[in-house]
Amino acid sequence: MTTLLMITLHDLTHMPELLEAWKRIGVPGVTILNSMGGFQASELVRSKGLGGFLKMFEEVRSGQRTLFSLIDDPELLELAISEADRIVKGFDRPHSGILFTLPIGKVLGLNKWGQESETEDSEIPPEEDRAKSNLLGWLQDDIEARYGEGVLKDWSTQRSKPVSEIMRQPAQKPIVARMDNTLQTVLQGFLGNPDACFACVVNSEGRLMGIIESQQLAEVMFMPVMPEEYINDPQGYEMVLQHADIEQMPVAADIMVDPVFVHPDDTVEKTYHLLKEHHLAGLPVVDKNYRVEGYVTLLELMAACFSEEEEQF
């Protein structure tokens, strides 16, 4: 059955990323309309008259857009919803917009005869990436000449292991907090799972929206208690001022940072690259709809690659 997916997007800065994500997963097409909330429109008519109201639409200056797409694949529909929910940091967040679907009966023109499926153009890697590739190729040639092909086969085996084989079985229980949870609730999660590197912040759909590291949580919670530790720079001074009232502490969504994550079928190679690039000790593991399944740590990566060489301490 064909479904109409509609989004009223309030924060237009998310639109380029959303369109790119939908194109990547294969959403067949998107129509974008200039739109405005009814209450906002009535206020505009009152303040500027009908002429000013109509002129604003002519100049395409309203603060929101409505996007819609017709999708006849249920799995693709769920992926499109998941991508949108992730990009706006959850539609349950204030001022994010609204998403809804409608069942559609008869549709003409969704599939065109003679229209070939689009294929992504082969991208030429940047100069820096080509240089790294060449350097790695030279290194592999030198290693093969010095140690033989066996070493390179070991490399390939270790690098290609999927995350699903590395995670502890059963999977480690991550700390999961809702976006509107208090910081005290997040703290209790860390106390109940002291081995975890971070807390996963999810929206009402259970999708990963952000992460909070224990050090980051400590800084925000200690600011009103020991402000002298943070006021040596303008940014720290402003943050202390913002969080000075212990009774008015922010919620999880206010302090979370954008998540870095992997999927179960991602490899050791990709996981280690992300850990090293972002200076992290662990990453959340999410399914294709960004729901948290567990997490993987740097120690687990090392164990997966070097567990055969055990020593007694």
Image (spheres, rainbow, N blue to C red):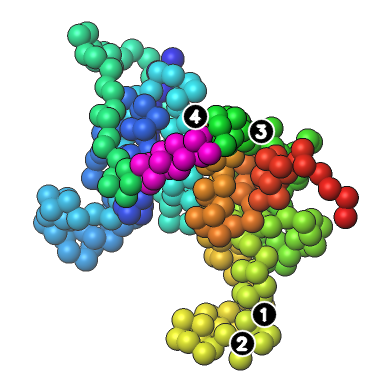
Q: Earlier in the sequence, mark 1 or mark 3?
A: 3
Measure the alpha-carbon separation of dots 1 and 3.
37 Å
Residue shown at 35%/54% (left/top)? 11
From the image, which quarter does the N terminus lie in?
top left
Give the class, few, some or many, for how many residues have Cα within 10 Å of label 1's Cα (few <14, many ≥20): some
Task: Name the disc covering residue 222, or none.
Answer: 1
Real-space Cα separation, disc 1 to disc 4, in angstroms: 41 Å
| Residue positioned 57% across, 47% down in the render | 272
Residue name at image x 45 percent, y 25 percent: 76
Helix, strand or loop at label 4? It is: helix
Q: Residue furthest top?
A: 113
Name the residue that disc number 3 marks.
Answer: 164
The amino acid type, in three-letter code, at marker 3 is Ser
Q: Which residue is mark 4?
A: 78
- The amino acid type found where label 4 is placed reads Glu
* Dot 1 amino acid type: Phe
Query: Residue 294 occupies which quadrant of the picture?
Result: top right
Looking at marks 2 and 1 on the same chain, the residue that comes earlier in the sequence is marked by: 1
Q: Are marks 2 and 1 in contact (CB under 8 Å)?
A: yes
Q: Nearer the viewer, mark 2 or mark 3?
A: 3
Q: Between 127 and 224, which is closer to the camera in this rendering?
A: 127
Instruction: Kindly identify which numbered label has been placed on residue 263.
Output: none
Q: Which residue is mark 2?
A: 229
Furthest residue toward front? 146
Of labels 3 and 4, the one closer to you:
3
Nearer the observer, disc 1 or disc 3? 3
Front of the two marks 1 and 4: 1
Q: Earlier in the sequence, mark 4 or mark 2?
A: 4
Which region is colored magenta?
A: 132-146
* Above or below, 170 relative to 45: above
Q: Secondary structure at mark 2?
A: helix
Q: How many marks?
A: 4
